[in-house]
Image (spheres, helix red, strand yellow):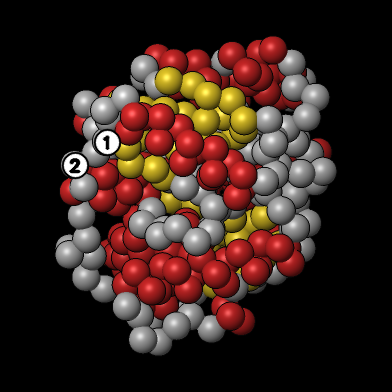
Amino acid sequence: MDLSTFPRTPLCRLPTPLEPLENLTRVLGGPRLLIKRDDMTGLAMGGNKARQLEFYLGQALDQGADTIVTTGAIQSNHACMTAAAAARLGLACHIQLETRVPGKGPEYAGTGNVLLDRMFGAILHTFPEGEDEAAADAALDRIAEDVRRRGGRPYVVHLGLGHPPWGGLGYVDAARETTGQADALGIDVDAVVLASGSGSTHGGMLIGLRAQGKDIGVHGVCVRRDKASQRARIIERVGEIESLLGVADPVPEGDILLTDDYLGPGYGQVTPELLEATSLLARTEGLLADPVYSGKALAALVGMARDGVWSKDETVVFLHTGGLPAIFAYADALGGL
């Protein structure tokens, strides 16, 4: 699938490593586990959003923008990496931080990704309702209009559906990269496990694999909404990415695999399964997972391996989506590990 016709600006150190998780494989006694290290994309402190931003900011530069405007939760890795990318490219950046996680103390709003937002020079805005994407996107558009009135040329990265998901192209490309690495190692991948939130990473990976003729299961782990709601979102997101690509042979809806068994009370809320899985990864592999996205996906990987979802002869790739600065905003929950 040729992505060269789409505007793109380099922000990542690619390819990211594909590494064995030999100790975790041995402890779980299940399938052979590998980790795709998209926590090592090289922008800010790493993460999957860097791949997406190469295409979003490619569009922005192509349109002559001088300011980037986007939204996310208070500890959003997307927001932080957008601020870092804008700084690298010499663009102004406005970040809208949505209140999504109840009951958090002052350290949550001042450390982790928020601290980095400020270090990268972003102008921060607040939005009180974290579960109304349409209202959050409308507020973004008002920020952008204010930038225009002041003589700026804003480019808005919306997170809601109904806007071109250029970022999904980053994971169409990541699918090619991952299978190429596996082929070079002589490994047949049977499944990929990843966090499923906005849907661009999940949808892009699924489309990228099917475009190569790879019948690899892509297991999305719900991190923001229940399985039924997320399924409807992924169906729409996949359709949007396919439309951008002009795909004539769409991905079957039956290929959209999701679990919300590890979501817990909701977005950004720590669960016992997450705590156990992140501790297990840290103490067997010396690797960290964040408490919002990759940690819940890791909890699902551990649980599904223990439940015998895959045989010992199969190979599963865990996509590490980064987000590590948020660890410091969750010190109250993680400190007892």
What is the secondary structure assignment of the residue under circle 2? Answer: loop
Pick whichever of labels 2 and 1 is earlier in the sequence. Answer: 2
Disc 1 marks a residue whose amino acid type is Arg
Label 1 sits on residue: 153
Rendered view: 290 above or below 229: above
> Residue 229 at what x, y percent from top left?
71, 63
Q: Which mark is residue 70?
A: none
Near mark 2 (Cα within 10 A), the count class, few <14, some 14-19 or many ≥20, is few
* The N terminus lies in quadrant: bottom left
Q: Are marks 2 and 1 in contact (CB under 8 Å)?
A: yes
Mark 2: amino acid: Gly
Residue under the image location 37 percent in, 49 percent down: 52
Q: Secondary structure at mark 1?
A: loop
Residue that extends furthest to the front in the rendered view of this protein: 149
Q: Picture coordinates of residue 283 (x, y %)? A: 62, 32
In the picture of the structure, the residue carrying the numbered disc 2 is 64
The residue that appears at 45% across and 69% down in the rendered structure is 240
Q: Please determine whether, in this image, residue 168 is positioned above or below residue 109.
A: below
The residue shown at (51%, 66%) is: 237
Which percent across, then down, holds residue 266?
A: 76, 44
